[in-house]
Image: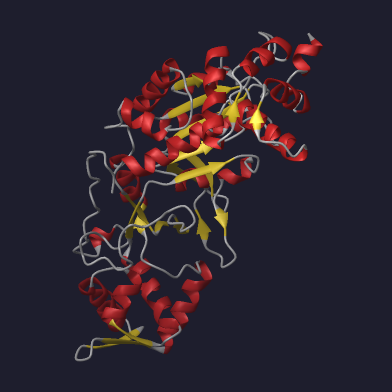
Amino acid sequence: MSQFETPSTCAPPVPETLEACGVPAPVLEDLLLKHLHLPGMATIEQLASQIRLPCTLIEALAQSLSSSEYAVLDSATQRVAMTVAGRRRACDAFGVSRYLGPAPVSQTHYQDQCRAQRWDGAGITADDLQAALSGVSLTDETCSELQLAIALGGSMLLTGRSGNGKSLVADRLGQMLVQSSEEIYVPYAIWLTDGILRIFDPQVHHPVDESDPAGECDARWRRIRRPVIKTSYELTRQTFDVTGLSNETWLAPFHVRANGGMLIVDDLGRQPVPLVDLLNRWQNALEFQTDQVTLPTGRRLNLPVDAWIVFVVGDDAPALPAPARRRIRSNVELPDPDRERFSTLLLEQGRRSRIEVDEAGVEELFTHCYSPQNPPKCSDPENLLQTVESLCRIQKETVRARADLLLAAARRLGLDQGRRAA
């Protein structure tokens, strides 16, 4: 699973009674009838596989439905068949919710599990962080700040000029989270008094167990790698609410599906809604690890938000409101590279690109392009060498980053504009 030593997350226990499921028995009966609606008949074992409850509990539900004449249970063959009354009840149940899948878990069980498997950065060392950021040049001070931010967890503000690698660092931290920590458990759905809310999303939740686990834990939960969800310009106030899907089922919002993992909010401040309005939606999540979401019925519901939230903010974004900034636990800035670090980045990029770099070119760049008012960015070396390569190919000469070609590339990229303006 990982080369790091991490504690294992406690698996939800298999329910031994209907009461232990945490969901009212009539809700489970309705779900069983909906599963019977199309075939009309199924075995206890087949229903147990679909509803993901033990056979003993499925049999108990079938006996209850049989006593109420909604179904007929053949004890000899362990087959359950619908009656006319049962079909009518199934149609009524579909009218309330078209959800057809594994049995849901209770909201309380979901909240408890989220709390138990919250990621706290345990076991992540400076060496682990350095390995995760391989190929990303950061100062020792920045690495120390990132290490502290990981230990603090909760939320982090990642700032710096565009081009200094904020999004890349956030993505690498997400990869580290997935590779360096234990798996967690996510339910297929949770039961609400007015509907069923899907939590498991195969687009972001990647299972590591078999599709039909053999009784090791409650089969209504899937063992997954910690999720990493990234959102950017598409973020609006409406995306925080429950989504009504085409088949009239509900899907939890993105920040709830990120529970137990990482949520990256990239380019914060460039969304179509005002930054203040957007951050106001985050206040409860940042301070209390919970959020009040709106259901399609209009009811407001509190759900846990137990993800490590990383806000990526550019230097051109509006200033963050003080209340939001206070609630963000750590702030890490990716600084502009100085002359020495820029030279190192340029030479390293040359080695990766197999392009010989004239070290005198650094002096030319700082003489004619860069200045304290117009500093370089970490992305400049890659862009410069790509442009140099294009210039050499156009001129049909050996690709080599001579000082004059580096200067010509910088001017083509507009890297000297700040110097000229000064």
Q: Residue at x 62, y 15 (%)?
A: 360
* Relative image position of residue 303 (x, y in whole percent): 44, 44
Q: Quadrant of residue 22?
A: bottom left
Q: Is residue 65 left or right of residue 230?
A: left
Q: Relative to 185, say whether 54 is above or below.
A: below
Q: Residue at x 42, y 85 (%)?
A: 85
Colour setup of the view:
secondary structure
Q: Residue at x 54, y 51 (%)?
A: 242
Q: Quadrant of residue 276?
A: top right
* Relative image position of residue 418 (x, y in whole percent): 75, 15
- Is residue 379 or residue 98 the one in the foreground? 379
* Relative image position of residue 327 (x, y in whole percent): 47, 23
Q: Relative to 98, say whether 85 is above or below.
A: below
Q: Is residue 274 left or right of residue 137?
A: right
Give the total of numbered labels. 0
State whether residue 126 appears in this view.
yes
- Is residue 185 or residue 303 the one in the foreground? 185
Q: Relative to 377, say whether 202 is above or below.
A: below
State whether residue 260 appears in this view.
no
* Relative image position of residue 310 (x, y in whole percent): 49, 32
Q: Relative to 223, say whether 332 is above or below.
A: above
Q: Which image quarter holds the C terminus?
A: top right
Name the residue at the right extreme. Answer: 421
